[in-house]
Image (cartoon, grey):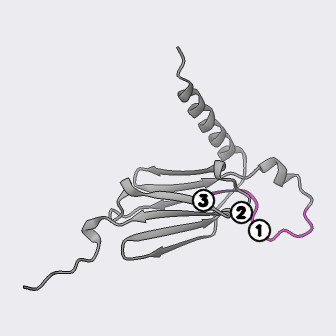
Amino acid sequence: MTDEKNIVKVEENNIWDESFTNETWVAPKTSIFETEDNYFLTADMPGVSRENIKVELEKGSLIIMGRINYKDVSTRKYILQENEFGNFYRKFNLSDSIDSNKIDAKFENGQLVVNLPKHERVKPKNIVIN
């Protein structure tokens, strides 16, 4: 008996691997900011749908990828083209001050937002004076 979940995962990875070797990849415009409890990474990925976003943790690195519909974009006859053209890819080394088990992400209006919670051990603590 064949496990359908594994087939889908292999096919999905093949699509990403194929596009990674055969298509253009550019770095998305990215910002990182900090609050008391979290770091936030925002990456602009215009033209990417939620289904074509991939966020991975691998060996202490955060990898973000976004695939455009490459065939549609590459056949356009541009009159003006100021945006870089390609899929989006960035890799960030993570500090050990980030609680990697609590990382989450959302994608809205062409922007990926990754929440990188700080470990409790690095958050400021108030000490009560007796």
Give the distance between the C-alpha atoms of the residues marked 3 and 2, in whole angstroms. 11 Å
Secondary structure, mark 1, is loop
Q: Nearer the viewer, mark 2 or mark 1?
A: 2
Image height of 57 relative to 37, above or below: above
Q: Quadrant of residue 94?
A: bottom left
Amino acid carrying label 1: it is Asn
Amino acid carrying label 3: it is Phe
| Image position of 87 (left or right of 126) | right
Q: Are marks 2 and 1 in contact (CB under 8 Å)?
A: yes
For the point 71% across and 63% down, the residue is 46
Secondary structure, mark 3, is strand
For the point 40% across and 50% down, the residue is 59
Marking on residue 83: 1
Marking on residue 96: none
Residue of label 3: 107
Is-magenta flag for residue 80? yes
Residues shaded magenta: 78-88
| Image position of 80 (left or right of 68) | right
| Image position of 10 (left or right of 86) | left
Residue of label 2: 46
For the point 92% across and 67% down, the residue is 79
Q: Nearer the viewer, mark 3 or mark 2?
A: 3
Can you give x and y, in whole percent of width and height, for residue 18 in the image?
A: 67, 40
Which numbered disc flags the more N-terminal residue, 3 or 2? 2
Q: Quadrant of residue 88?
A: bottom right
For the point 45% across and 51% down, the residue is 57
Can you give x and y, in whole percent of width and height, for residue 8 in the image?
A: 60, 31
